[in-house]
Amino acid sequence: MAGFLDRAKEQAQSALNQGKQKVDEVQQQRAGNDLLKRLGAAYYAERHTGGTPADTQLALAAVEAHIAAHGDAFLRGTG
């Protein structure tokens, strides 16, 4: 009986870890998408409404930092 409970506990822990990993991935995807949105808005503002190149560079640096920390999977997302 103890073996069964140990296996059940291991499976539950594994499922919990997978769930946490998926939540982290979704949060990273959303953060990356938000950064891309900010970059696009900064670029548009620079070209059309008086935004500055410095603002665009800051937004680009934030995207690049996110890629360095979390990878570029969000660039290929379906969102």
Image (cartoon, grey):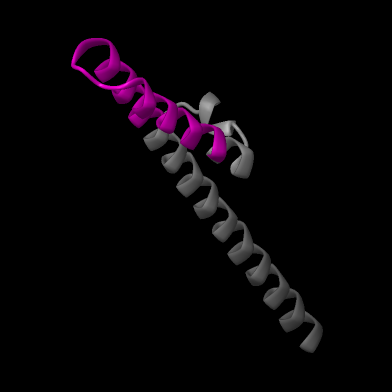
Residue 48 picture quarter: top left
Judge whether residue 1 can be spotted in this image.
no
For residue 61, side relative to residue 16 (left or right): left
Residue, far bottom: 2
Q: Foreground: 46 or 78?
A: 46
Q: Foreground: 23 or 66?
A: 66
Q: Foreground: 70 or 51?
A: 51
Residue 4 picture quarter: bottom right
Which x, y percent locates residue 36?
41, 29
Q: Residue at x 53, y 53 (%)?
A: 24
Q: Foreground: 3 or 31?
A: 31
Q: Which residues are magenta?
A: 36-65
Which x, y percent locates residue 71?
62, 37
Quadrant housing the C terminus? top left
For residue 6, side relative to residue 22 (left or right): right
Q: Residue at x 35, y 22 (%)?
A: 40
